[in-house]
Image (cartoon, helix red, strand yellow):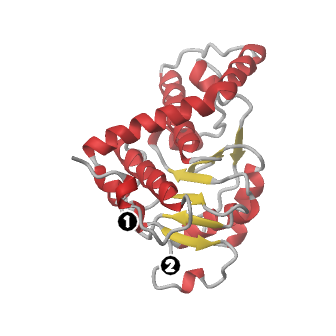
Amino acid sequence: MAKTAARLRPTALHEGEWERRVDLAAAFRLAAINDWHEAVGNHFSLAVSVDGKRFLMNPRWKHFSAVRASDLLLLDSDDPSTMDRPDAPDVTAWCIHGRLHALAPQARCVLHLHPVYATVMASLANPEIKPIDQNTARFFNRVAIDLGYQGLANSEAEGERLASVLGNRSVLMMGNHGVLVAAETVAEAFDCMYYLERACQTMVLALSTGQPLSVLSDDVAEKTAMEWQEGVRDYAIAHFDEMKRRLDVLDPDYAK
């Protein structure tokens, strides 16, 4: 029988931190199952303090399929000595996630990935996700687009630039790079990433036919996006809970 997160919870952690660790570890395992990850790169983070500046993040160069709740680093975006630690995170992870948690307190959970279809879309001159079905319509006028790629994000200035481009939106299409999703909870961020990659898959396959796209009117697209927005929180939580139940059977090591 799989051990549950509650039975494995260390007593020294702050209230609620272990549950957050388990949720974030589950997101890593699920990203690997969905083939969204890339080698031992890409990073997820989750705020554990009210101001969002103390956050959990995956350790440097550990494969998503092996990340456990107890492996996650606890970092402080205001700590200038972070990169001097013996267990310092990947520099690009620190520059992106550290700056986002410092400057965008609404971005409690940040997922940065290079999934195939979203990255293909991010590589187009116009990476706009057009509303051609109800999944793509979810993102109508709700995606920030960055076309200023200058190489690896290995400076705090680049992290600050990305935070500025994201603004108050939840999705950043990172031109020539990948995608970033920010949300209040792991469940909402995971669900958003799931549907973002599905929407991009639909766009790529539709474009590959060479046929004209049947694009929804702005009114219908906005109505559909609002309908998603109104009910998505409960839906996302249910979606993520179901996926964690699958992990509890198939890959329970994540909760250790």
In the image, residue 83 sits, relative to residue 199, either above or below, namely below
**Is residue 211 shown left or right of residue 98?**
left
Q: Which residue is mark 1?
A: 62
- As measured in the structure, the alpha-carbon distance from the residue carrying label 1 to the one carrying label 2 is 13 Å
Measuring from the top left, give residue 92's x and y in whole percent.
Answer: 56, 68
Q: Which residue is mark 2?
A: 88
Measuring from the top left, give residue 109's x and y in whole percent.
Answer: 60, 52
**Is residue 210 shown left or right of residue 156?**
left
Mark 1 crowd level (few <14, some 14–19, many ≥20, 10 Å Cα): some
Residue 123 visible in rendering: no
| Residue kind at label 2, given as amino acid type | Ala
Q: Quadrant of residue 40?
A: bottom left
Disc 2 element? loop
Residue 169 visible in rendering: yes
Mark 2 crowd level (few <14, some 14–19, many ≥20, 10 Å Cα): some
Disc 1 element? loop
Along the line of sight, which residue is nearer the eye, 202 or 70? 70
Disc 1, disc 2: CB below 8 Å?
A: no
Along the line of sight, which residue is nearer the eye, 62 or 156? 62
Q: Residue furthest left?
A: 1
| Residue kind at label 1, given as amino acid type | Lys
**Is residue 61 shown left or right of residue 251?**
right
